[in-house]
Image (spheres, rainbow, N blue to C red):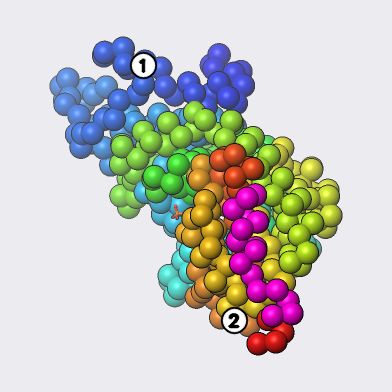
Amino acid sequence: MSKSDNWSFETRAILKGQSPDPSTGATIIPIYQTSTFTLDGIGKNKGYCYSRTGNPTRSAAAECLASLEDAKFGFIYPSGIAAINSALQLFKSGDHIVTCQDLYGGAHRLFTQILTPLGMEFTFADARYTDEIIKAIKPNTKLVWLETPSNPMMHLCDIEAVVTCVKEINARENRKIFVACDNTFASPYIQRPLNLGVDLVMHSCTKYLGGHSDLLLGALVTRDEQMAERLAYLQNATGSIAGPFDCWLLMRGMKTLAVRMKQHHANALEIARWLEKNPRVLKVNCPALESNPQYALYKKQMDLYNGMLSFEVDSDFDSVKAMVEKFEIFQLAESLGGVESLICHPPSMTHAAVPVERRLELGIKDTLIRLSIGIEDVKDLLVDLEQAFASLPSKVESLAN
Ligand SMILES: *Cc1c(COP(=O)(O)O)cnc(C)c1O
């Protein structure tokens, strides 16, 4: 325990793991762009020998993020998917993993197309219902992999309820099923799953942690020393490491995480309420709205909301596709979590590879639009939405066609 462990979130985000550089006094951690480190003598180093094994810029970013998640150990990977892949390497052929039905598409592909042929087994449950997750647990289940809020429907799963049930099974059957959580959509400012009993937290730092759509990184953090030792071993053995420049950008991003998340929350809530009142909107998916069936869980589990929501337009496929091209501030792009607002049409973009019947089962209709709401002035964002909605053919016109 060091003094800095008592600092509040905002202070740790700026300073944790980032004391001035001992050799020069540089206030900001330098980008240690070096592959190797010169030894003082055989077996005498300053904590680093080779950058695959460890690099000071990467260590600083990992220490800062671990602190923000109230973890003890952190690891930074070249992408979110690389972090998920490393987490799954803790398990082996024959192991069964229970996860969410509406899992991030890239994780779904990794699980079904890469890890299933290697002998791992996956069950995709409707994670809104804790019972569904618990029902899917089998004798060879070793991991429950959660993701909340989900994409693009913003469904939540009750992290604490899942952990409680899994711990009961572990105690009753004298076994160890781990629980992990992809915390990308919430960010540690809003939700800290380790405090709810989860064993491992994963991030795509590409999103809110980086916050500026200018890097690709992933992370794993844990309090479990044995797991951390294995993750360090795996990272060095498989070479799944992030470069120092990207880690430096991540540290810069994390310094403003708290102020950014407050603004994402405020802008998203105002836009969600505006959409809810719009006669051309059939449904708004945002658990921070009082009308959402998961509002109580949102209040229990998350300190604030993020900038993500989706909504169904009362129109048809072609008109909605035309509408998303009409935006002037919202940029038509995949990804999320940056300071700039993005708009996405999941059925023809992020979820185009999902078969149409499956999409409909998940509630991803052809008229669904997803927004990643940035931190611009919300007045400008509302004007942009208004002019894009004005481009929709009226219902009478579209009936006539
Ligand atoms: C983007 C994302 C990932 C994958 O991260 P990359 O950095 O793109 O590899 C994983 N999970 C969630 C929830 C994401 O949004």
Q: Residue at x 63, y 42 (%)?
A: 378
Residue 353, position in %: x, y?
50, 75
Residue 387, position in %: x, y?
61, 58
Q: Nearer the viewer, residue 75 or 317?
A: 317
Residue 214 figure quarter? top left
Q: Which mark is residue 356?
A: 2
Residue 380 figure quarter? top right
Residue 376 figure quarter? top right
Instruction: Determine crowd level at label 2: few under 14, some 14-19, many 20+ residues with C-alpha closer than 10 A.
Output: some
Number of marks drawn: 2
145 left or right, relative to 117: right
The secondary structure type at the circle numbered 2 is helix
- Dot placed on the residue nearer the N-terminal end, 2 or 1: 1
Residue on which disc 1 sits: 27
Q: Nearer the viewer, residue 262 or 67?
A: 262
Q: Nearer the viewer, residue 352 or 219?
A: 352
Report how far apart the C-alphas of labels 2 and 1 lie in the structure: 53 Å
The secondary structure type at the circle numbered 1 is loop
Q: Residue at x 43, y 32 (%)?
A: 251
Give the residue type that dot 1 points to.
Answer: Thr
Give the residue type that dot 2 points to.
Answer: Val
Rendered view: 136 above or below 168: below
Residue 94, position in %: x, y?
52, 69
Residue 121 visible at all: no
Q: Nearer the viewer, residue 229 or 217?
A: 217
111 left or right, relative to 395: left
Instruction: Determine crowd level at label 1: few under 14, some 14-19, many 20+ residues with C-alpha closer than 10 A.
Output: few
Rendered view: 337 above or below 81: above
Residue 381 visible at all: yes
What range of the chain is rendered magenta?
Answer: 382-397
Q: Residue at x 49, y 60 (%)?
A: 332
